[in-house]
């Protein structure tokens, strides 16, 4: 019989209030892996209530910041011990390469160690005042219950990027993972209990976005929503949060430029372009999906990228030799395929890939694809495809490529390949994106803040700044003067 998982609320497993479960499939084999509880408003109410009570209980509220940090570090140790198991589960659930998920899971404890170390470094300040008798200081307080809504492409990493700073700052959380990848988040909550987090501090309600997700966003006791996913859903969440004046951190879509100048090391740049768009089958918000190559190196770059695209080994994500796994679910495959057809209808040339490959497995596989003869006004170049589809375009001057790169609704990341030091830093300044990579692509660390500009997001993830996003700042005024307080209506001369 298929295994079934309930919600994780207040330290124990709960049946869904509506009694319904839904299947999660392995996208490579199409087998059902497990069934997860289909959460609804009643389940969200129970989880938020548990988180609210946990927030007020002395076992969490009165815990010293140093002890909160220790819990996070202990959880980091447990994740490290279970890294192989968790990586395998994620690979089975979303079809990404086991090799890649292993890499992610082995570095995941770094988030927990980093924010564990920061927990007792949340400081206020003493502010100068106009009177020596008047003391003014600030303190940072936790917000309360944080709602975290996360996607399927890197389930644990993207959830931990929210959870670790929120917990370090003393909040409690309710997580609504993607309906495509519920299982590792539930395992993570179990490990957190083992690490010693009190009941109710971390709760997980599984289910669908418009049901469990929307109920979490609308819940009156949620103090903040932290979301990673599509720009469309992010916009709806921001509107709902604005109506209640609560904050939100949103990490949304992208259509990132990867720019290759004529003075670049072209072999390296080609590898950077390949990594930027074909790693994770292009299913990352930071995918370098718009490639701009200087006209004098365009042909060479195109051939290098297309040759590698054609030789990429597609197949079972659990095998070490595999370089590209399936897309995560059927709708995703159809979306990518229809964008490729649209591109061709718009006048693009299919230079490599473009179809479903021959693979021994029945899953949602799609070839690494290169589109040429594309222009910045085509929908395939403007809209996020979230698949292994690169659009490669020539340019002539630096000014021209800056204008082209910035001519997008998104502003998540950008890559620049050049050996000219001045140009590298100049481009970093001129590109309208929150993360700039020079002669590399996809570098990331929990210590380095990330922000999506324009329609790519609101707020900051990673770094000290992210932890501050889970606090509110209070200003305290103290009159240290023991002299009688003057009558405010008697004017002094
Ligand atoms: P993706 O393309 O990454 O699946 P989505 O924005 O559809 O992007 O999903 C990201 C997360 O947001 C998932 O956990 C999903 O269930 C959730 N979600 C989708 N729609 C809503 C909604 N209307 N309200 C709240 N959460 C939602």
Image (cartoon, rainbow, N blue to C red):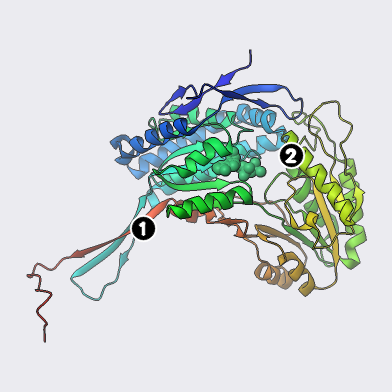
- Residue 33 position (above or below residue 146): above
The residue lying toward the viewer, choosing from 380 and 62, is: 380
Residue 353 on image: x %, y %: 89, 44
Q: Are marks 1 and 2 in contact (CB under 8 Å)?
A: no
Disc number at residue 473?
1
Residue appearing at x 84%, y 57% in the figure: 392
Q: Residues within 10 Å of mark 2 (few under 14, many from 20)?
A: some
Q: Secondary structure at mark 2?
A: helix
Question: Which residue is at the far left?
Answer: 484
The correct choice, above or below, for 51 with respect to 375 in the image is: above
In the image, taking residue 374 as reference, residue 1 lies left or right, namely left
Give residue 101's position: percent from left, percent from top.
67, 36
Q: Quadrant of ligand 1?
A: top right
Q: Which residue is found at the position 73% from the left and 37% from the top? A: 331
Look at the picture and state if 81 lies above or below 243: above
Relative to residue 62, is residue 253 drawn left or right? right
Left or right relative to 8: residue 103: right
Q: How far, Cα to Cα, is label 1 from label 2?
A: 42 Å
Left or right of 128 in this view: 436: right
| Residue furthest bottom in the image | 493
* Category of crowding for the residue at label 1, using alpha-carbon neighbours closer than 10 angstroms: few (below 14), some (14–19), many (at least 20): few
Q: Nearest the camera: 222 or 263? A: 222
Residue 332: mark: 2
Give the SS element for disc 1: strand
**Camera-side residue: 322 or 409?**
409
Disc on res. 178: none
Q: Position of residue 410 (x, y in %)?
A: 67, 59
Q: Is residue 126 above or below residue 52?
A: below
Q: Quadrant of residue 168?
A: top left
Q: Earlier in the sequence, mark 1 or mark 2?
A: 2
Whether residue 166 is visible, yes or no, is: yes
């Amino acid at each position: 019989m298929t295994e079934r998982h309930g919600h994780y609320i207040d330290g124990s497993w709960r049946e869904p209030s509506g009694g319904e479960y839904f299947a999660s499939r392995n996208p490579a084999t199409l087998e059902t892996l497990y069934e997860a509880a289909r959460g609804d408003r009643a389940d969200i109410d129970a989880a938020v209530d548990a988180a609210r009570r946990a927030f007020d209980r002395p076992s969490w509220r009165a815990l010293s910041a140093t002890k909160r940090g220790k819990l996070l570090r202990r959880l980091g140790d447990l994740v490290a011990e279970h890294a192989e198991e968790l990586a395998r589960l994620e690979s089975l659930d979303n079809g990404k390469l086991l090799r890649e998920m292993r890499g992610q899971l082995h570095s995941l404890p770094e988030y927990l160690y980093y924010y564990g170390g920061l927990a007792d470094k949340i400081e206020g300040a003493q502010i100068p005042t106009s009177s020596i008798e008047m003391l003014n200081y600030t303190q940072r307080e936790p917000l309360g219950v944080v709602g975290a809504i996360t996607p399927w492409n890197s389930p644990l990493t993207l959830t931990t990027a929210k959870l670790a700073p929120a917990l370090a700052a003393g909040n409690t959380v309710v997580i609504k993972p993607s309906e495509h990848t519920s299982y590792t988040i539930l395992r993570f909550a179990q490990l957190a209990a083992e690490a010693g987090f009190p009941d109710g501090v971390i709760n997980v309600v599984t289910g669908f976005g418009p049901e469990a997700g929307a109920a979490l966003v609308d819940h009156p006791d949620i103090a903040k929503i932290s979301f990673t996913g599509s720009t469309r859903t992010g916009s709806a969440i921001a509107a709902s949060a604005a109506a209640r004046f609560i904050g939100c951190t949103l990490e949304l879509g992208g259509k990132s430029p990867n720019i290759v100048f004529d003075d670049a090391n072209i072999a390296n740049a080609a590898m950077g372009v390949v990594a930027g768009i074909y790693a994770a089958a292009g299913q990352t918000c930071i995918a370098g999906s718009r490639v701009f190559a200087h006209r004098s190196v365009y042909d060479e770059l195109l051939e290098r990228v297309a040759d590698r695209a054609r030789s990429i080994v597609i197949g079972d994500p659990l095998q070490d030799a595999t370089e590209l796994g399936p897309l995560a679910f059927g709708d995703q495959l159809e979306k990518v395929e229809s964008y490729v057809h649209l591109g061709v209808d718009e006048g693009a040339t299919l230079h490599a890939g473009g179809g479903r490959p021959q693979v021994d497995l029945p899953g949602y596989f799609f070839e690494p694809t290169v589109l040429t003869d594309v222009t910045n006004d085509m929908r395939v170049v403007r809209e996020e495809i979230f698949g292994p589809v690169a659009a490669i375009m020539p340019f002539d001057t630096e000014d021209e490529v800056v204008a082209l790169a910035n001519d997008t609704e998104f502003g998540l990341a950008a890559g620049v390949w050049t050996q000219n030091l001045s140009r590298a830093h100049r481009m970093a300044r001129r590109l309208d994106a929150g993360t700039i990579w020079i002669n590399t692509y996809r570098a990331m660390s929990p210590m380095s803040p990330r922000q999506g500009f324009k329609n790519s997001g609101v707020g900051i993830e990673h770094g000290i700044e992210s932890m501050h996003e889970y606090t509110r700042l209070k200003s305290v005024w103290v009159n240290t003067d023991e002299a009688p307080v003057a009558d405010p209506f008697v004017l002094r001369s």
